[in-house]
Image (cartoon, rainbow, N blue to C red):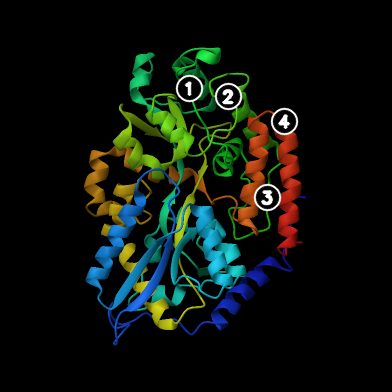
Amino acid sequence: MHKTHYLPIAALLVLAALLVASCTAPVAAPESADSVADAGPVELQFYYPVHVAGPLGQAVESYVAQFNEEHPGIKVEPIFTGNYFENMARTQAAIEAGTPPDVAILLSTDLYTLIGLEAVIPLDDYIASENGLDIDDFFEGFMYNSTSAGQVWGIPWQRSTPILYYNKDAYAEVGLDPEKPASTWEELVEYGKLLKVGEGDDVSRWGVEIPATDWILSNFAIQAGQHLGSNEDDPCVTYLDTPEAIQAAEFIRSLQTEHEIMPDGVIQWKTAPADFIGGAVAMIYHSTGSLSVLLADAPFEVGTAFLPGGPEGYGAHVGGGNFYIMADVPKEKQDAAWTFIRWMTRPEQIGQWGIDSGYIAPRNAAWETDPLKSYAEEVPQAATARDQLEYALKEFPSTIGAQEMKQLTGDALEAIYTGEMEPAEALQQAQQRAEEVMSQGGCE
């Protein structure tokens, strides 16, 4: 079976929200940014991750420094905690030790885990307050992973979709139109063969590299006609071994075996951007969050495009991290954390983050406000991922045990990429493990 339920799931999610709310005083935002403290600044610990290439931590710390300068009643301490997975592990450890951060950027897919831990508070009262936020201004695709049981739990920040990056110079070199990137699975194969240089052990440039991650596989599954999870508020759904999922994995594997346009073996997440910049591959699938680094470091013109469409056309899903306010911290710290989140997500600030990082600024207003408005006109690659949101669904795995789900899907992909297992066998095994994880987490 692919779908299992709480008793009933909607009731349990509402109960989780009520439990968090019962442990937290009613939320009302402070009247001003600095009224949260009369005797010295309110000090906040802020955990944040970096999961893509580049010195993005420096950008975040510069924003925090500016915020602190403008808000003498609040002092935010930025604490870099590694990649997303290291960040979540450190946050969970701090929660269990009774010393949680006050505010954190965590994966949007960690939402159900955080609610289950009673670790975060719903933000609806803050949003609706006098010092609130126009939540309707945020792109719908990014709110899928930010809400549960009718409440908003996270505010989008470093949000993304994967996109196709391609070497425009290499396209021109082999007679391809640099303004017409591969747009279908068939063209990906056709172009990849033209772009590959060398054979056997003497390949100097591969056609394409696709990292072996659940986040990338999910896009191929959507393009084949079936999301690996649910686009609804249902954390007890996985579809890892459907015909569409298997077709997606088989196509990826065929790029290594049948078509020989992608290097054999597991392709790591961090390897693809470095290979692309170095000219060792002509096309890669990667996060839009890598855009700023690739534009700055590649010694050729970088093209960006929607992910090539499969049997059911274009398809992608969202990803990235949200701001969360922790439950087990004093009310004055929660108020200060909201002031910080509001400042960080105002259109001009989150637009600057989009420029510095390549992530999609998740607010419509940011794209109509400088500096991002002018930047997008000068650098059209910046709008590719935003425009692809038309075809994007909720991120997988938005399930109970999301971290475990990522690991088991990654294990299946590693077995597929190395040829240790056929796609159908690997994904059937992954589905069985996924159902066990969800069952242990309360799904039936």
- Which residue position is annotated with label 3? 238
Marks 3, 4: nearer the viewer:
4
Gap in angstroms between the C-alphas marked 1 and 4: 23 Å
Task: Tell me which residue sits at (62%, 24%) in the image.
Answer: 254
Nearer the camera: disc 3 or disc 2: 2
Report which residue position mark 2 lands on: 255
The answer to whether the residues at label 2 and label 1 have Cβ atoms under 8 Å apart is: yes
Name the residue: 34% across, 47% down.
55
Q: Position of residue 144 (x, y in %)?
A: 51, 57
Residue ID for mark 4: 422
**Quarter assignment of residue 296:** top left
Q: Earlier in the sequence, mark 4 or mark 2?
A: 2
Q: Position of residue 327 (x, y in %)?
A: 51, 76
Q: Secondary structure at mark 2?
A: helix
Q: How far across and down, in percent of the image, does residue 341 sit?
A: 36, 67
Q: CA distance from mark 3 to mark 1?
A: 32 Å
